[in-house]
Image: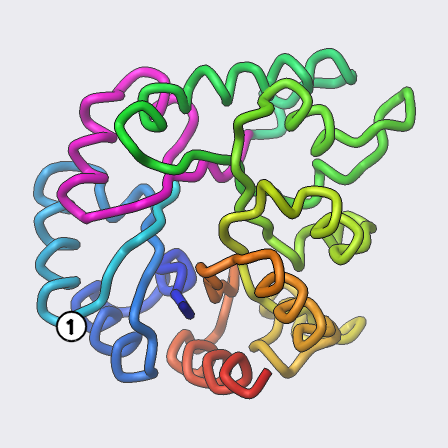
Amino acid sequence: MFSYQLYSSRNFGPMPKTFEMVAKAGYTAVEGYGALYADDAAVEATKAGLAATGLTMPTGHFGLQQLETEVDRVLGIARALKMERLYCPYVLPEDRPSDPAGWTAFGERLQKAGAPYKAAGYGFGWHNHDFEFKPLSDGSMPQDRIFEGGPGLEWEMDVAWVIRGGADPLVWIERYKDRITAAHVKDIAPADENTDEDGWSDLGQGTVDWKTIIAALRKIGVRHFVMEHDNPKDDARFATRSIASAKSF
């Protein structure tokens, strides 16, 4: 299933038009992020956008603080939008642990935060960036430490961030093949290109060997492939080009 992370379109027209654009491009699903369910009105607007276009929202991102302190509200959002899996997407630099034990404890914290959602029947896990692949003082990786502390956590693997972190995604796919339940699909522009788009590119226009990586992810049973671009100049261009490339792999 090719999905579209709506965060990619946060700087563009009103959300109803974004839903229409995504559906027209050929997607059947989208992934939510905080602004789409910031309050009851936003939830209702998102629900209406899905209904109007026939899109589904099987996965959604929620901040750690909200996951920990607003359990009933998060569960209500997930039910209203018919989500299947919830992922915690980020931790601010000032809140990141600085040593191996800290990252293991962070994994324990995530697992505890996810317990009520798993009990309610939802998948729950972590979505990475690049900092999880920077070696710690003992040579271990934060990503491993997180999973050590949270043995029940799923992983939404953001492949391009793994690469930007200096790691080989195929190695990590093999290592955590039993944990990966979704993947973010975005491409990295050649060096010194697309600097006005933070060095990202439309899928198939960059340097990532997505044909091989998607095959590896499909082999381990991943169903949710979520297109994302952190800073596109034209979200419709990104959405259309990227799904065309993905369908060719």
Percent across and percent down for residue 244 are 48, 86
Colour option used? rainbow
Number of on-image labels: 1
Q: Is residue 198 above or below residue 153?
A: below
Could you tell me which secondary element the residue under label 1 belongs to?
A: helix
Between 229 and 216, the one lying in front of the other is: 216
At a point 67% along the width and 52% down the height, the residue shown is 161
Q: Quadrant of the N terminus?
A: bottom left
Question: Was residue 72 drawn as part of the magenta stretch in this picture?
Answer: yes
- Direction from residue 7 to residue 217 in the image, left or right: right
Q: Indicate the quadrant where residue 119 lies.
A: top left
Q: Is residue 141 above or below residue 49?
A: above
- Direction from residue 42 to residue 60 in the image, left or right: right
Between 121 and 198, the one lying in front of the other is: 121
At a point 29% along the width and 33% down the height, the residue shown is 121
Q: Amino acid at mark 1?
A: Thr
Percent across and percent down for residue 98 are 74, 18
Q: Residues within 10 Å of mark 1 (few under 14, many from 20)?
A: some
User: Mark 1 = which residue?
Assistant: 53
Percent across and percent down for residue 69 are 31, 16
Question: Was residue 49 drawn as part of the magenta stretch in this picture?
Answer: no
Q: Is residue 196 above or below residue 237?
A: above
- Direction from residue 99 to residue 230 in the image, left or right: left
Q: Quadrant of the C terminus?
A: bottom right
Q: Indicate the quadrant where residue 118 lies.
A: top left
Between 213 and 42, the one lying in front of the other is: 213
Q: Residue furthest right?
A: 138
Q: Which residues are magenta?
A: 62-91
At a point 48% along the width and 66% down the height, the residue shown is 227
